[in-house]
Image (tube, rainbow, N blue to C red):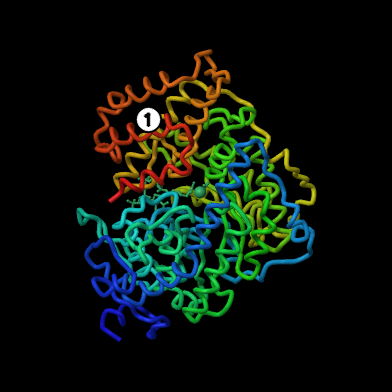
């Protein structure tokens, strides 16, 4: 084994054949289309061969699953409504449980999430939370540099050697001892995304396989030896079949890397409207390796909007009014808790968008009160744990869960009182669209997109955490409101009676640069005009773009 391989593959023996990049790599079908210093330590020939093997085995199935999404959406666009499946009724009716949970995942009352830069990784692992979800998805802008810096940071964190010096030398960050660290979980990007910098046989590899595969390749054995995983969060699934695909991928990884069957455990985000109708089926498809389901509320609202993009009777009020106490979101959480606990899985709560507000005690108290109310709602509903966006929120979330959940989890709360039917899950919420709500959607979208294009995937805007999922809600609402008048239908109106038309959008976009002019330190300030142009095009397009990050990724790197 070469020095590089010996350094980069902790297991000591290569489980897969080695191929080479460069000219020889092109001959082997593997091409790296970007280069940053030190990447060869992660993208070793063996790691690349491992990723290529997964691509060759699973790419056609991934494409079939993505095509199935479009087919299903075409039916929704034609008027069909999502519902529980008839062909899987036996799975829902059956009496079965998921595999016993590992000790490290029994008590997950507070999970912190955050992007994968070294400082955040250290702060999150040291934060006192039970778990840390290292996020390559909603909160990471997937520049090549961010992805590889993240993989490198996580690899060093698993090895216990990660440290980081603030650029001005003012603080040296080091990890606490392993037993005091949060349990690491990693969230790869979703099935819809490609990783354009790594091509196999002329095709870009799936971003999910790249993120998860590379992490597993370098860390799985060390984590397994410490009985700490590997553990993953799986995002944006839309169907049982997509869970089957994940299960096959994870089986393959276990076999190839010599892990015990079922060593990899996953938590699936239920964050699309179609998936809420297949929760039992998703648990069943991943029965031997699932640990829980999570209410990914922001993408869930985005998915509701997207699914019903052409359903005039399902238009939601402005973003700020679509809170978790709205009946359709309450039903989603209740059904998730009931489903999980019936099967022996954890029912994880989600993320309140409020973050601590520095320099304004009153506003800070109000923000924290909202987070507290959200966590209280979750623990009362029967959730086994929750998410926080910021370390300062951990004590608050822990206090609420400790008080109401004296046991490590509350799987004994079966929620047999819950009776959720299809119509409960698709009921639109009442409310209004105000001028401020419209303009806020425009501002959030532009500022988030600008930050993302600049390599920053999570930013505070007006003291709310904004990431890809929250920005998607703003973007999709704008498109839906603006296109409500298509095909000769009546336009929608703001609460003040103004018709929602493209003039309204134009005025909001034109006014933005001057509104933000004195904020030169805004994340992504130099990309604001580009973001304005993108939002303008996305809103004018006749069809709704599936994901904001698909066209945006073409402009990255
Ligand atoms: C819809 C979804 O998918 S939710 C999941 C995805 N979203 C997330 O994970 C949100 C993660 N949160 C964040 O990225 C950040 O909290 C932000 C961007 C919202 C705010 O960050 P900042 O403006 O840096 O916050 P602030 O200045 O108050 O940070 C104070 C300290 O806490 C740290 N910190 C803030 N958030 C986190 C976090 N999530 N994990 C670890 N450390 C964090 C900062 O690094 C900073 O550390 P330092 O004192 O050592 O310099
Ligand atoms: O990933 C979480 C969400 O709310 O979206
Ligand atoms: Mg999400």
**Secondary structure at numbered mark 1:** helix
| Residue 130 visible in the shown view | no
Q: Is residue 430 above or below residue 79?
A: above
**Residue 486, percent from left and from top:** 53, 24
Side of 18 where 404 appears, left or right: right
Side of 462 where 103 appears, left or right: right
- Could you tell me which residue is drawn at 48 percent across and 43 percent down? 546
| Residue 535 visible in the shown view | yes
**Residue 168, percent from left and from top:** 20, 53
Q: Residue furthest top?
A: 497
Q: Is residue 501 above or below residue 251?
A: above
**Residue 388, percent from left and from top:** 50, 50
Side of 36 where 349 appears, left or right: right
Residue, disc 1 = 536
- Could you tell me which residue is drawn at 53 percent across and 43 percent down? 298
- Could you tell me which residue is drawn at 24 percent across and 34 percent down? 520
**Residue 226, percent from left and from top:** 48, 77
The answer to which of 509 and 206 lies nearer the viewer is 206
- Could you tell me which residue is drawn at 35 percent across and 63 percent down? 202
Q: Quadrant of residue 169?
A: bottom left
């Amino acid at each position: 084994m070469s020095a590089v391989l010996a350094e980069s593959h902790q297991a000591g023996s290569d489980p897969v054949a080695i191929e080479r990049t460069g000219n020889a790599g092109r001959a082997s079908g593997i091409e790296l289309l970007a280069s940053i210093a030190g990447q060869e330590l992660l993208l070793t020939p063996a790691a690349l061969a491992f990723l290529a093997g997964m691509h060759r085995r699973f790419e056609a199935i991934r494409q079939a699953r993505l095509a199935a999404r479009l087919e299903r959406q075409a039916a929704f666009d034609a008027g069909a409504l999502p519902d529980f499946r008839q062909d899987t009724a036996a799975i829902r009716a059956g009496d079965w449980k998921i595999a016993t949970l590992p000790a490290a995942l029994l008590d997950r009352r507070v999970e912190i999430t955050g992007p994968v830069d070294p400082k955040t990784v250290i702060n999150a692992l040291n934060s006192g939370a039970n778990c840390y979800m290292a996020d390559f998805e909603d909160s990471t802008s997937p520049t090549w540099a961010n992805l590889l810096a993240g993989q490198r940071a996580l690899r060093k964190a698993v090895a216990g050697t990660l440290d980081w010096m603030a650029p001005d030398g003012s603080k040296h960050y080091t990890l606490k001892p392993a037993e005091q660290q949060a349990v690491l979980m990693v969230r790869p990007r979703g099935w819809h995304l490609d990783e354009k910098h790594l091509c196999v046989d002329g095709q870009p590899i799936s971003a999910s396989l790249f993120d998860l595969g590379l992490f597993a390749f370098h860390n799985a054995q060390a984590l397994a030896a410490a009985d700490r995983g590997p553990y993953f969060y799986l995002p944006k699934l839309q169907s049982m079949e997509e869970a089957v695909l994940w299960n096959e991928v994870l089986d393959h990884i276990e076999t190839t890397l010599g892990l015990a069957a079922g060593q990899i455990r996953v938590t699936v985000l239920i964050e699309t409207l179609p998936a809420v109708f297949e929760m039992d089926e998703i648990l069943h498809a991943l029965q031997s390796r699932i640990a829980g389901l999570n209410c990914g509320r922001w993408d869930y609202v985005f998915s509701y909007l997207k699914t019903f993009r052409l359903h005039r009777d399902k238009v939601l009020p402005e973003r700020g009014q679509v809170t978790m106490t709205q009946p359709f979101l309450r039903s989603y959480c209740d059904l998730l808790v009931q489903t999980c606990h019936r099967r022996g899985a954890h029912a994880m709560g989600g993320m309140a968008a409020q973050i601590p507000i520095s320099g304004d005690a009153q506003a800070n108290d109000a923000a924290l009160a909202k987070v507290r109310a959200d966590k209280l709602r979750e623990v009362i509903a029967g959730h086994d744990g929750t998410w926080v966006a910021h370390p300062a929120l951990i004590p608050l979330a822990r206090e609420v869960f400790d008080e109401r959940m004296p046991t490590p989890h509350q799987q004994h709360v079966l929620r047999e009182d819950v009776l959720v039917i299809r119509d409960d899950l698709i009921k639109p919420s009442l409310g209004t669209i105000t001028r401020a709500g419209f303009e806020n959607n425009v501002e959030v979208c532009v500022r988030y997109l600008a930050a993302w294009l600049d390599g920053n995937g999570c930013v505070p805007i007006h003291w709310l955490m904004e990431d890809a999922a929250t920005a998607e809600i703003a973007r999709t609402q704008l498109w839906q409101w603006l296109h409500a008048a298509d095909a000769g239908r009546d336009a929608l109106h703001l609460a003040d009676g103004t018709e929602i038309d493209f003039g309204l959008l134009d005025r909001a976009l034109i006014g933005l640069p001057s509104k933000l002019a004195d904020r030169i330190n805004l994340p992504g300030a130099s990309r604001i005009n580009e973001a304005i142009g993108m939002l303008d095009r996305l809103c004018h397009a006749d069809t709704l773009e599936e994901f904001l990050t698909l066209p945006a990724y073409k402009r990255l790197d």
